[in-house]
Image (cartoon, rainbow, N blue to C red):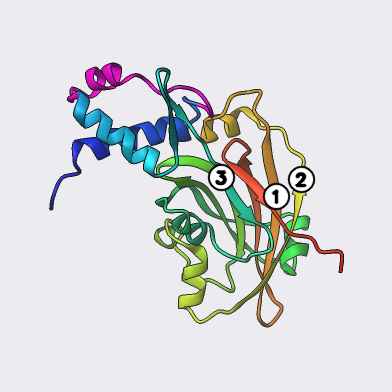
């Protein structure tokens, strides 16, 4: 297996710094000299890395001044039912999950109502950190009925939940949701790597199979500096 060229390694590290918010929109990245010293690379190699990111529309150059960040948020189409994995791959990024919790619990009334479950029913509680290019952008808490998915495992939830459902022959019909105002807790700020003053976007979702049976209730917490919601409205 071929190793990743050094200029691509440098470009990837700059990408991570931008995604983590260390370098913000319209801020300058380190100079060629500084990057060359940091990565023990030649100026030619550094220029290759910078040009790659310019070509990817992530950076822009100002003659005689430097190279700056042209940061773009992930635009989430609220009218399109697609998984996080599908969404991130279409953007040319690499999705990944960090599984924080996978356990069985007795759900509270709100969750039972959304999932149309009897009092004695149990659910899987799955807490995941959703990442793009190794940068955390969403914290997800999902509740799924054990009776519907007895073979659900931690390994499955490390990948795409919707891919698992479709591979089992389930047909997903629709997903409903509501946006909830939220202030990040100390734990949430740490997990999403955000500052105390940074707002978050919170959404509660519940989804149905083609037989109108709900199969999940999910709470999502988005980094507002990395995510934006888009929709289209027509008068006629």
The number of numbered discs placed on residues in the rendered structure image is 3
> Residue 162's mark?
none
Q: Residue furthest front?
A: 63
Dot 1 alpha-carbon crowd within 10 angstroms: few under 14, some 14 to 19, many 20 or more: some
Compare residues 10 and 112 and report the one nearer the observer.
10
Identify the residue position indicated by label 3 in the image: 138
Q: Residue at x 48, y 78 (%)?
A: 168
Compare residues 10 and 81 and report the one nearer the observer.
10
Query: Which numbered disc flags the more N-terminal residue, 1 or 2?
Result: 2
Position of residue 17 relative to residue 102, above or below, is above
Q: Residue furthest left?
A: 1
Identify the residue position indicated by label 2 in the image: 180
The C terminus appears in which quarter of the rendering?
A: bottom right
- In the rendered structure, the answer to whether residue 188 lies left or right of residue 235 reads left
- For residue 75: magenta? no
Query: Which numbered disc flags the more N-terminal residue, 3 or 2?
Result: 3
> Residue 203's mark?
1
Q: Pointer 1 and pointer 2: residues touching (CB < 8 Å)? A: yes
Dot 2 alpha-carbon crowd within 10 angstroms: few under 14, some 14 to 19, many 20 or more: some
Q: Residue at x 78, y 63 (%)?
A: 113
Q: Secondary structure at mark 3?
A: strand
Q: Residue at x 29, y 35 (%)?
A: 49
Which stretch did the figure color magenta?
24-42
Residue 74 x, y percent position in the rendering: 56, 47
Residue 13 x, y percent position in the rendering: 33, 33
- In the rendered structure, the answer to whether residue 84 lies left or right of residue 224 reads left
């Amino acid at each position: 297996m071929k190793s990743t060229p050094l200029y691509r390694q440098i470009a990837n590290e700059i990408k991570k710094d931008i995604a983590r918010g260390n370098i913000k929109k319209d801020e300058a990245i380190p100079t060629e000299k500084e990057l060359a010293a940091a990565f023990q690379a030649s100026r030619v190699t550094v220029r290759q890395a910078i040009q790659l990111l310019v070509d990817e529309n992530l950076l822009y150059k100002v003659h005689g001044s430097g190279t700056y960040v042209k940061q773009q948020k992930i635009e989430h189409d609220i009218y399109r039912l697609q998984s996080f994995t599908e969404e991130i791959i279409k953007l040319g990024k690499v999705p990944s999950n960090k599984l924080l919790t996978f356990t069985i619990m007795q759900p509270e009334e709100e969750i039972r109502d959304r999932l149309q479950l009897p009092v004695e029913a149990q659910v899987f509680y799955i807490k995941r950190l959703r990442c793009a290019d190794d940068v955390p952008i969403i914290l997800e808490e999902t509740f799924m009925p054990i009776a519907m998915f007895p073979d659900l495992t931690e390994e499955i939830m490390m990948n795409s939940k919707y891919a698992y459902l479709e591979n089992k022959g389930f047909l997903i019909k629709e997903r409903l949701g509501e946006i909830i105002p939220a202030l990040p807790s100390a734990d949430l700020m740490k997990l999403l790597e955000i500052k105390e003053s940074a707002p978050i976007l919170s959404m509660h979702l519940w989804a149905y199979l083609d037989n109108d049976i709900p199969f999940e209730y999910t709470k999502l917490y988005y980094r507002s500096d990395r995510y934006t919601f888009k929709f289209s409205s027509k008068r006629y």
